[in-house]
Amino acid sequence: MTSSNLQPDAPPSQPTTATLPRGRLVLLFMVMLVTAAGNTAMQSVMPAIGTALKVEDFWISLAYTWSALLWMICAPWWARKSDQRGRKAMMAIGLMGFISSFGLCGLALYLGLHGYLGALGTLLLFALCRSLYGLFGSAAPPAVQAYVASRTSRAERTQALSLISSSFGLGTVLGPALAPLLILPLLGLVSPFLAFTLIAVIVLIALRLRLPDDTPAFAGRGDVMAAPFSANSNASRQSDDDDTEAEIADAAAPPPDKLSWKDSRMRPWLVAGLLGGHAQAAVMGIIGFLVLDRLGLRATPELGAGPTGRILMMGALATLLAQWGLIPMLKLGPRASCLWGIALAAIGTGLLAFAHAEHTIMVCFALASLGFGLFRPGFTAGSSLAVSRAEQGQSAGIVASVNGAAYIFAPAIGVWLYGHSQWIGFAVIEALCLAVIVLGWRSLSVDDGLTGAR
């Protein structure tokens, strides 16, 4: 695909030069961070909870499936709603969905651990409460991505989305790493559920108070958008410059057609994201069990929280290095980030299959995390740059849906394959990475055609 296939975002006389204020970027970062942490924080405590409830590992992993399926279905719908009702409103809905889901999941597990519910009833109630996250929590990430994409230039979008993606990636790794540290004597293993629920409430309040309102494209957004800026600067029209002239022009443009998953501009990026996402989800699913097996801690799983936390924290640092350091420093475009990232992930995962000492596992997992940390923002930015500015909301919803789809079956299948044969489990992950490399080399658009001026 060449740049001539892409529709212009704004008239040539109005170049896009926007940047997001730091305060707004921090808020968006925190929205993504807390929702991502909520999606994975329970990974550190759920194996222990499952053991206490006498539930097999596979069924614990499968309990996330319904929520992930709802995420995949609902994310595009919420993205279209964000174009109509405003991105801030969708972020708030996402946070409220997370708060209700996480709080109720903690209550269900508390009732099960204290004998008020049987193991089967507890697991079913947990899955039902967890589904609230997939149903409503999926409103936040596409709204955040669309908010960023509509307020940044094409040249800056990769780095901006890399920062936002790093918050999601950081939450994915930090969530399970921090959860054991939040365990309190009175609540026991369900303490992290309460802690992350309270953190999300604080972020929701900050979002409501600090992020300026945005209004749907069919409304008179100029007058409405001016109001939030008047509190911090003069009320002149120039105070809206950081929302870009291109965004104002897009408000007057007719709404775009519904964006299809089969759209030829996005299809290679979506397939690559789906394959690479499944590889990453499988690695994240098995890493805790691998630590217990390789360090000989199956008989005393409570002792595995320490080394597992240290390994996950090293993975978080590697993810930060990729998304906050390497991508901006090397000025990597979407295609380069995808290909280099998935290649490093394949190498790290292959070495992880042979690692047995904690230090070796830590280094191999960090290398794999570095690769996935490069891959994910590359896929996200590539999908965004493949379509016009007016289609960013729909593109963000499809990307969020792809990210959710990776967590429907991949973690459970990864754990199941690993339990039957560790080598088959790792071979499948390697095959997924190789498929991304082949597809990316042949089908992904070159970076100059994506990020160059159109």
Image (cartoon, rainbow, N blue to C red):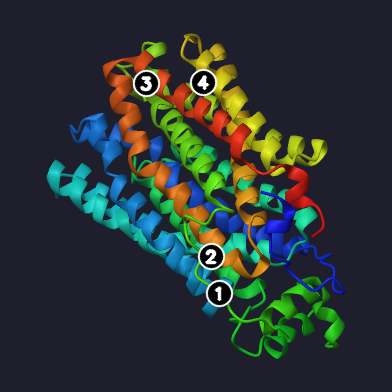
Q: Which mark is residue 349?
A: 4
Disc 4 crowd, CA 10 A, few/some/many (<14, 14-19, 20+): many
**Mark in front: 1 vs 2:** 2
Q: Earlier in the sequence, mark 4 or mark 2?
A: 4
Q: CA distance from mark 3 to mark 2?
A: 34 Å
Q: Nearer the viewer, residue 145 or 59?
A: 145
Q: Are marks 1 and 2 in contact (CB under 8 Å)?
A: yes
Q: CA distance from mark 3 to mark 4?
A: 11 Å
Residue type for callout 2: Gln
Q: Position of residue 95 (x, y in %)?
A: 48, 63
Helix, strand or loop for disc 2 = helix
Q: Is residue 428 visible?
A: yes
- Give the residue number, with chain letter if any, for mark 2: 394
Q: Earlier in the sequence, mark 3 or mark 4?
A: 4
Residue type for callout 3: Gly
Q: Are marks 4 and 1 in contact (CB under 8 Å)?
A: no
Q: Is residue 366 visible?
A: no
Vertical side of 31 occupied by 53: above or below:
above
Q: CA distance from mark 3 to mark 1?
A: 41 Å
Q: Position of residue 318 (x, y in %)?
A: 64, 30
- Give the residue number, with chain letter if any, for mark 3: 425
Q: CA distance from mark 4 to mark 2?
A: 33 Å
> Where is residue 310, by image quadrant?
top right
Q: Which mark is residue 345?
A: none
Query: Quick check: 166 left or right of 291?
Result: right
- Give the residue number, with chain letter if any, for mark 1: 83
Q: Residue at x 60, y 18 (%)?
A: 363
> Where is residue 438, by image quadrant?
top right
Position of the C terminus by quadrant: bottom right
Disc 2 crowd, CA 10 A, few/some/many (<14, 14-19, 20+): many
